Amino acid sequence: MLSTPLFAHSGSGASTDLALKGGPPVRATPWLDWPVWDREAEKPMLSILRSGNWYRGDGHKCEEFEQKYADLIGARRVIATASGTTALITGLHALGVDAGDEVIVSPYTFIASYNVIFNQKALPVFADTNQETFTIDPLKIEEKINERTTAILPVHIYGLPADMNRILAIGKKHQLPVLEDACQAWLAEYDGKMCGTLGELGAFSFQNSKHIPSGEGGALVGSNDALMDRCFAFHNCGRPYGASMAGMGQNAVRGSNKRMTEIQAGILLSQMKRARADADKRLGNALYLDSKLKDIPGIIPYKLADGATRSSYHLYPFRYKKEHFDGLSREKFRAALQAEGIPNYGGYGKQYYDGLIEDALGSRGYKRLFSAERLNRYRDELHHLPENDQLTEEAVMFFQNMLLAERKDMDDIVRAIRKIYENRSQLV
Ligand SMILES: Cc1ncc(COP(=O)(O)O)c(C=O)c1O
């Protein structure tokens, strides 16, 4: 039984006819569009455009962004990159991840976290997910380490910090560097420190859907000068950079072009101004949702990992247990929510079966780099991710822009879920 009366704040949601069955939806008001900008942001962009200095070698916006982002997240050094993907590739290269190596990574993530490892011609080795926290289960990492393992890549998915104390301890014990995929975790905190600043390196994304958006964009964060010099050099065509590379010839190291443009940096400088206030607003609304949703049978909000102090809520995730809804499938539940005016998302699927892994493993290069025995064992291990498999079937989430609305809008979300729960018999 629910402890509070249904439809307490009733409004249009008072009908017991589900919107999917022709009843009036709980909510007809649209949610905030994303991204958002104002007139104040237009002037500096116009001046970058008119200057013709669109490349970082000619302007100072990328440098300014790097300094301000470092201040925002308490990082020692930041390198602006073209995207989160390029930040991760730069980091993996600088950490020495090479062809034939293995990198331990969370299976529950955006596909870029797999792809960047394949880019290095290395093997992404999945340690199962902790369903409660949505992040890599540190207890599953050590069994995956072998003589080819060169790094650990935990992902702070949806902004939920991974269990970094345990992960860093494993890294230290096995002398493996930790590259944090913080591409969804701006201003998320673990143990009072910002995600992305805890491991050897951290990578961020500023793609258009992100909380600090610039169409495309990224950043690599670290505190070790020699390592960050190597990162800078790699992202800038291999040109030596910083005191640790002083005296080296112009083409002494390998590189690529992963640079951010001045235009991207200009957009970020204006978007960054609202990041802190937005993050606080999302947090307040998310905590409110936590307190309400946990009382609805079958709805289990995310749990923060041990030591995590704050999520960034790139998405607000929970697990949907259909057995409490008389077997109503997640897909039908999601459709019913959508019909009630509550947009939602089912999160990542079992993407290790989608084809990209076989595309890599079946290639000439991978067959040269890894023994047939290793590749077959790897294939087999993909079928032993039970927690992750289950999470992909039960997760439901709300978008970050919804968390920028008001408390009464959060009540709409709660009311819609309760309405579906109470009237589930209409759908099963
Ligand atoms: C977890 C994660 N890793 C990596 C990336 C890659 O970032 P980008 O899209 O900026 O290349 C993203 C972007 O969505 C992401 O969410």
Image (cartoon, rainbow, N blue to C red):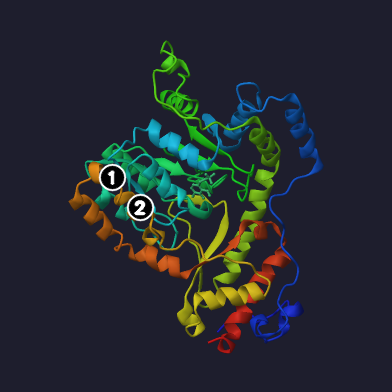
Q: Quadrant of residue 227?
A: top left
Q: Nearer the viewer, residue 325 or 277?
A: 325
378 in relation to 365, above or below? below
Side of 118 where 17 appears, left or right? right
Q: Quadrant of residue 55?
A: top right
Q: Residue at x 47, y 20 (%)?
A: 239
Q: Which residue is mark 2?
A: 359
Q: Quadrant of residue 9?
A: bottom right
Task: Residue type at mark 1: give it.
Answer: Arg
> Residue placed farthest to the front in the image?
364
Q: Nearer the viewer, residue 14 or 291?
A: 14
Element under label 2?
helix
- Sequence-first disc among 2 and 1: 2
200 in relation to 18, above or below? above
> Residue placed farthest to the bottom in the image?
425
Q: Can you see residue 200?
A: no
Task: Residue type at mark 2: give it.
Answer: Asp
Packing grade of label 2 (10 A; few <14, some 14-19, many >=20) is few
Q: Which mark is residue 364?
A: 1
Q: Answer yes or no: disc 2 within 8 Å of ligand 1.
A: no
| Residue 281, x across and y down, in percent | 67, 53
Q: Can you see residue 334?
A: yes
Mark 2 near mark 1, Cβ–Cβ under 8 Å? Answer: no
199 in relation to 13, above or below? above
Packing grade of label 1 (10 A; few <14, some 14-19, many >=20) is few
How many numbered badges does the structure rendering display?
Answer: 2
Q: Residue at x 35, y 37 (%)?
A: 177
Side of 337 where 409 appears, left or right? right
| Residue 211, x across and y down, in percent | 62, 48
Report, in whole angstroms, how far the alpha carbon at label 2 lies from the one at label 1: 10 Å
Quadrant for the N terminus in the image: bottom right
| Residue 91, x across and y down, in percent | 43, 35
